[in-house]
Image (cartoon, grey):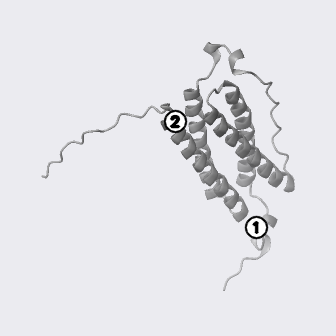
């Protein structure tokens, strides 16, 4: 039986981060901080209570991601990205109609952001050599996939989803 010893042996939390893991943790935390800020703005624009509920879940998940990624960075002597300033609160009726995002637009934007988050998590999982980092981003991936399904379901129920052209009649295949 071959055993791994040295710096890559034992508990993965005690292994050093490689430069890619440091960058990915730092960048992911920074993106999550941006997501919190943008999603809070979407909350001020949103009128639908179900959409606001999903926005709240996105903020909660992003805050967890920031907390966990920043804790790993700090534990490894890396200064995390600075937090963004809090947005002042706004009421939907105070936002001019021409400047307001519609619920349909918000739904499309958060669906896109969530799908990009899935790709980022997959890439980080694939590059990680520390099992705890790979597992952390696998956890984020599962949560983002579940959020994506909730967004899709809501968009369909509310009539916000604009599908691409659908193939209703399939051409008859000719055997040659």
Q: Is residue 4 above or below residue 86?
A: below
* Residue 166 quadrant: top left
Camera-side residue of 101 and 46: 46
Residue 43, given in percent of the width and then of the height, sits at 69, 30
Outermost residue on the front side: it is 49
Q: Residue at position x 61%, y 23% from top?
A: 101
| Residue for badge 2 | 155
Q: Residue at x 73, y 44 (%)?
A: 60
Tag 1–tag 2 contact (CB < 8 Å): no
* Residue drawn at the location 78% of the way across and 52% of the way down: 68
Read off the residue under disc 1.
Answer: 12
Quadrant position of residue 112: top right
Spatial CA distance of label 1 from label 2 is 41 Å
Label 2 residue SS: helix
- N-term mark: 1 or 2: 1
Camera-nearest label, 1 or 2:
2
- Tell me where residue 126 appears, x and y as whole percent: 61, 58
């Amino acid at each position: 039986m071959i055993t791994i010893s040295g710096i890559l042996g034992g508990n993965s939390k005690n292994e050093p981060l490689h430069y890619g893991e440091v960058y990915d943790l730092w960048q992911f935390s920074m993106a999550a901080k941006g997501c919190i800020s943008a999603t809070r703005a979407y909350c001020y624009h949103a009128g639908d209570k179900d959409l606001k509920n999903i926005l709240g879940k996105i903020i909660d998940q992003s805050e967890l991601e920031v907390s966990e990624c920043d804790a790993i960075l700090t534990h490894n002597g890396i200064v995390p990205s600075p937090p963004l300033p809090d947005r002042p609160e706004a009421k939907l009726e105070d936002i001019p109609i021409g400047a307001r995002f519609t619920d349909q637009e918000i739904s499309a934007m958060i669906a896109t952001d969530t799908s990009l988050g899935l790709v980022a998590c997959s890439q980080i999982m694939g590059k990680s050599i520390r099992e705890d980092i790979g597992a952390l981003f696998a956890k984020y991936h599962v949560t983002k996939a579940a959020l994506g399904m909730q967004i899709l379901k809501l968009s369909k129920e509310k009539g916000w989803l604009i599908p691409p052209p659908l193939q209703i009649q399939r051409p008859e295949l000719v055997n040659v």
